[in-house]
Image (cartoon, helix red, strand yellow):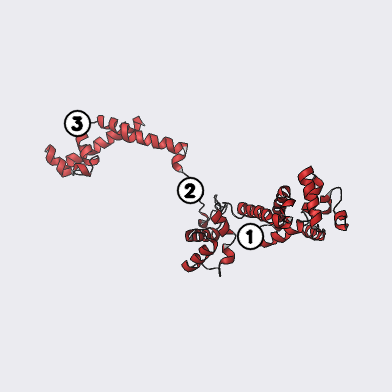
Amino acid sequence: MNNATTSLSVRDPWALVPSLGNLDAYISAVNRLPMLTQDEEKLFARRLRDEADVASAGKLVLSHLRLVVSISRQYLGYGLPHGDLIQEGNIGLMKAVKRFDPDQGVRLVSYAMHWIKAEIHEYILRNWRMVKLATTKAQRKLFFNLRSMKRDTHTLSPEAAEAIARDLNVRVQDVIEMETRMGGGDIALEPSDDGGDDNYAPIAYLRATHSEPTQILEDRAFDRLQGEGLLEALESLDARSRRIIEARWLRDEDDGGTLTLHDLADEFGVSAERIRQIEAKALKTMKTALAEYA
């Protein structure tokens, strides 16, 4: 074999590459690693496939590490660490090496590009925002193409959105929705320590109070108070007082609405002031009965 094969025939092929702790040294090292010829690539791939030769797998991976570095640079605009992008791309490369068939007539570099990009894409989608922005195929396509296809930083016009949707073969509403998602940002669920008015956190209005155990108990108690408790309180009144309370407070629009003090005064043949006194006494009696029920 030639010098390239000899240089890759170390006992531990990964010993040639420094750790990711020093990214510049790593990139410099992988760029110095020799490439395999097509015959060498087929030889090592067949050894891996037929004999499960781990050393051959290492040589295939080592010779393509520079490819990962090159592809990872295309995704630096997402604000994620370059070292992490390379690391995820290396995982994709190893998956490609494991599945590579040398007898298909395709070079490993062409086959591995898909796996490397797929792994980097997954990493970006998991880590670019707290909430994953793209789950469907159309959303993923838009996530990785929308920013480069926008001509400026302004909101997309209907015509521009239609053009992008046509080019990517997706729906216009998917384009608009993805632009909105990418234009937003993460919001802290809990408030910050300074307690300013500008820090009204979502936890204050997103929590489902109706699902809290204490709130459920309070709601049930209130419902009982309005039902059984109110009925028991009414039963504690004499007939005239109950009639006045029901006419003044418990009639709805279907019953003609509540009656006035004068209406009840005419009904019972007394003054409106007397009706008011009876009403006040009855309400006090009911309040005591409700307190005892509660």
Residue 91 at x, y percent in the picture: 71, 50
Dots 1, 3 in contact, CB < 8 A: no
Point out which mark residue 78 bears. Answer: 1
Q: Quadrant of residue 49?
A: top right
Does 200 sit left or right of 265 as displayed? right
Name the foreground residue: 269 vs 191: 191
For marks 1 and 3, the one nearer the N-term is: 1
For marks 3 and 2, the one nearer the N-term is: 2
Distance between mark 1 and mark 3 Cα atoms: 77 Å
Name the foreground residue: 233 vs 185: 185
Residue 21 at x, y percent in the picture: 77, 54
Q: Amino acid under label 3?
A: Ala
Dots 2, 1 in contact, CB < 8 A: no
Name the foreground residue: 48 vs 77: 48
Residue at horizontal 50 percent and vertical 58 percent from the top: 174
Name the foreground residue: 76 vs 288: 76
Residue positioned most to the bottom: 151
- Which type of secondary structure does the marked residue at label 1 adopt? helix
Does 288 sit left or right of 49 as displayed? left
Point out which mark residue 239 bears. Answer: 3
Residue 228 at x, y percent in the picture: 31, 31
Distance between mark 2 and mark 1 Cα atoms: 29 Å
Does 294 sit left or right of 168 as displayed? left
Residue at horizontal 74 percent and vertical 59 percent from the top: 67
